[in-house]
Image: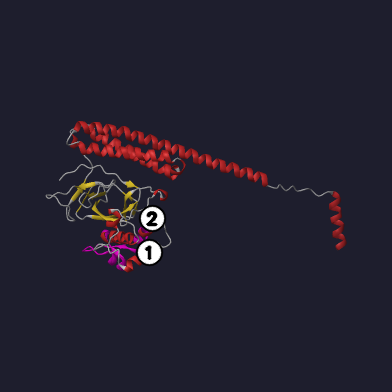
Amino acid sequence: MKYHVLSFGIRYLADSNMVGDYDKNSDIYKKYTQPEELVQSDNPELVSKAQDITKGENDTLKKVFKVYDFVIRHMHYMTQDEERRAMWALENKTGDCSEYSYLFVALCRAVGIPARIQVGFAFSSTSETIEDGHMWAEYYLGNYGWVPVDATWRDFNTLDRRHFTSMSSIPEIIPYANYLFNSTKDSELTDKQTVTLKPLSPDAFDGSLFPENVLTTARSVQQAELSVFLAEALGASLIFPPDAEKADQAIFASQIRLQDAIDRWESNQEVAQLNVTDALKTSDEALQRASMLVYKASAALISIVIIIMLVALALIGRYQMPCEKKPLTRQSASINHIRADTVD
């Protein structure tokens, strides 16, 4: 099978104040908080450990991070010949991506946080052939949905573009997935299937400008993402939340349109060309919004610093007590001299 894929990374900027409560009667909650053969979330020892890890914490986001932090500190990577259970990982403190993921999911479920396993492939470079699958985890967050966590690769609330999932691994559609396989009876995803990821070649498009537009759009999106990241580091999401949200939405829209253009190339090149042109315009808009966000955040930060400095200088000038030294007069000098002679 041959695939042309444009992949993107994903990073969730979840706000604890926006996280919704779990509907414990929902199918998602019931299904993904239950124990399984390899996810022993009802084991008393594991439940006790999960409760100890999250003790005193009511914030769901912070609970999940504490579980993640425990797993990456507790575990040491070592390839296994077979998949081990979550309890085995907890007791032996070692394992590969399977054990990392099973332990994370089990600990989350043990404290009432829906979590599940995700499988696919993960590449360490842009051109590589691999024969083994990869496993990571997801947890469910109210008002956000499924959020990825790859404890093996130290990815929390984020997943880079080298991760490809299988559409057959879970029934639900997830927004961030770089789909690699749509399994059928003739093509089942297996751990020993050889997969090669190679950069997109312009030769596949018969001299069309399509690949050039794709790459231009992808670079524009990447620049916009970097600008948004810089703006957030400057506090833009706190100072200008509507602008930050619009920039994120513009980036996401351009990514979706670009992927749609690539998906349509083989079936309808004319529509694909129109879609990639639209994606390019959207990416330019995203870059403009992101750049303006950096400018506004920088200006706001500089203004705040200047105001603080002016206030500090004003306070220093107001409360500073100058001390003037007065020279000794001849009279006082003579008195001191007389006193010194008298003492002698």
Which percent across, then down, holds residue 52?
39, 65
Which percent across, then down, holds residue 193?
16, 53
The number of callouts visible is 2
Circle 2 sits in a helix, a strand or a loop, which is it? helix
Left or right, residue 282 beside residue 119: right
Q: Residues within 10 Å of mark 2 (few under 14, many from 20)?
A: some
Vertical relation: 144 (above or below) 240: below
Q: For the magenta stretch, what is the residue range?
A: 68-97
Which percent across, then down, holds residue 179?
23, 46
Residue at 86% x, 59% y is 339
Residue at 29% x, 39% y is 255
Any part of residue 28 in sight: yes
Any part of residue 223 in sight: no
Label 2: which residue?
A: 60
Label 1: which residue?
A: 51
Residue at 19% x, 33% y is 269
Quadrant in which residue 225 is drawn: top left
Q: Residue furthest left?
A: 186
Which percent across, then down, holds residue 302?
51, 40
Q: CA distance from mark 2 to mark 1?
A: 13 Å
Amino acid of disc 1: Gln
Q: Residues within 10 Å of mark 1 (few under 14, many from 20)?
A: some
Amino acid of disc 2: Thr
Left or right, residue 138 beside residue 296: left
Left or right, residue 57 beside residue 167: right
Judge whether residue 324 is colored magenta.
no
Quadrant in which residue 75 is drawn: bottom left
Left or right, residue 98 beside residue 296: left
Q: Earlier in the sequence, mark 2 or mark 1?
A: 1
Quadrant in which residue 308 is drawn: top right
